[in-house]
């Protein structure tokens, strides 16, 4: 249930979150100026710029509303059917859900590309995770359909998303149940020679360019950090590999030494056994001679 003020805020938010990502902040600040002194001004000022993945999902919702509604309907049907399914059927269901979210993510990337925005693999993964959350969690589905996401969504697929986290992922907490307005792509038309030049046009263009650069720098920093981490991991594993190889070489050398010692011991054992056998023969001979001598002595004493 919303009041008039919230309804007006949702209407403004619907317009702002439909804009290209670089235009969001300048447009929001302009609306705040227009609303200065009204109760709406601080609430509009509090609207956060969406993360890249959230902006891509918001774009998809507005450009392909029917497709998103179909995805959410499939998600609802799958949630109902899931309770009575066997393990094999659940695996098939999971594969189907992944196929659907992957296909819709591809469509979202194409739409962003049409806006001149290249979606990285990392952002695409967040978009797909958001669509998956919308399919497995009804509340997440309503958040996606609002078109007012500021951060991507994620869920384990077992438990619903934490309500506090979900509320923080949308621009207006009361947006659950609100549906974004469908919007077609705006194609550039012929210049209107009678349009009065906008004195702030250069400033707006500069602000938009700065906003785009800031987003690009953030994306570069993230990619660079990931690359540095990957390089460090390769270096660590390479060093460990050299250490293990050195240990293997040392063990092989030690094994060769032990095998040589074993061969020498085998020869010594053979020689010792020959000496033992000869000594045993001598012992048997000496024993027989001793016994014979003892008997001879006993016969002599008995005479």
Image: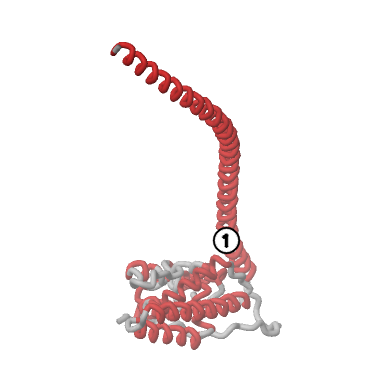
Q: Is residue 37 left or right of residue 226?
A: left
- In this rendering, is residue 278 above or below 66? above
Query: Which residue is at a point 39% across and 19% down the rendered structure image?
Result: 292
Q: Secondary structure at mark 1?
A: helix
Depth check: give the residue in front, 74 or 284: 284
Q: Is residue 292 left or right of residue 194?
A: left
Q: Is residue 37 visible?
A: no
Q: Could you say which quadrant of the image residue 38 lies in?
A: bottom left
Q: Could you say which quadrant of the image residue 175 lies in?
A: bottom left
Depth check: give the residue in front, 245 or 187: 245
Relative image position of residue 147 (x, y in whole percent): 46, 78
Give the quarter of the figure containing the N terminus.
bottom left
Counting labels gives 1
Depth check: give the residue in front, 292 or 164: 292
Query: Which residue is at a point 57% across and 77% down the rendered structure image?
Result: 106
Query: Which residue is at a point 61% across and 76% down the rendered structure image?
Result: 115
Q: Is residue 25 left or right of residue 41?
A: right
Relative image position of residue 42 (x, y in whole percent): 39, 68
- In this rendering, is residue 270 above or below 238? above
- Give the residue number, with chain letter if any, for mark 1: 219
Depth check: give the residue in front, 121 or 60: 121
Kindly give the residue lying farthest to the front in the view shown. 303
Q: Is residue 290 visible?
A: yes
Give the quarter of the figure containing the C terminus.
top left
Q: Residues within 10 Å of mark 1 (few under 14, many from 20)?
A: some
Q: Could you say which quadrant of the image residue 162 lies in?
A: bottom left
Query: Which residue is at a point 42% across and 69% down the rendered structure image?
Result: 154
Relative image position of residue 202 (x, y in whole percent): 64, 68
Relative image position of residue 111 (x, y in whole percent): 59, 78
């Amino acid at each position: 249930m919303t009041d008039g003020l919230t309804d007006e805020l949702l209407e403004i938010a619907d317009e702002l979150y439909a804009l290209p990502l670089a235009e969001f902040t300048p447009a929001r600040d302009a609306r705040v100026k227009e609303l200065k002194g009204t109760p709406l001004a601080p609430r509009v000022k509090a609207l956060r710029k969406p993360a890249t993945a959230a902006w891509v999902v918001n774009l998809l919702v507005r450009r392909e509303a029917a497709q998103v509604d179909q995805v959410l309907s499939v998600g609802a049907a799958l949630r109902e059917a899931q309770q009575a399914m066997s393990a094999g059927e659940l695996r098939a269901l999971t594969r189907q859900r992944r196929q659907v979210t992957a296909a819709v993510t591809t469509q979202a990337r194409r739409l962003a590309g049409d806006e001149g925005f290249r979606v990285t693999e990392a952002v695409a993964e967040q978009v797909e995770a958001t669509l998956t959350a919308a399919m497995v969690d009804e509340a997440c589905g309503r958040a996606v359909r609002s078109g007012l996401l500021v951060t991507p969504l994620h869920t384990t697929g077992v438990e619903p998303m934490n309500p506090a986290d979900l509320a923080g992922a949308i621009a207006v907490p009361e947006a659950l149940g609100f549906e974004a307005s469908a919007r077609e792509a705006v194609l550039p038309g012929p210049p209107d020679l009678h349009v009065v030049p906008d004195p702030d046009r250069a400033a707006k263009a500069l602000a938009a360019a700065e906003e785009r650069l800031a987003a690009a720098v953030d994306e570069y920093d993230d990619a660079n950090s990931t690359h540095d981490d990957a390089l460090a991991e390769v270096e660590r594993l390479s060093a460990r590999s050299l250490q293990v190889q050195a240990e293997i070489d040392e063990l092989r050398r030690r094994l060769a030494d032990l095998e040589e010692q074993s061969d020498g011991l085998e020869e010594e054992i053979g020689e010792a056994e020959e000496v033992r056998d000869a000594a045993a023969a001598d012992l048997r001979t000496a024993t027989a001679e001793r016994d014979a001598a003892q008997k001879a002595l006993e016969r002599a004493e008995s005479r």
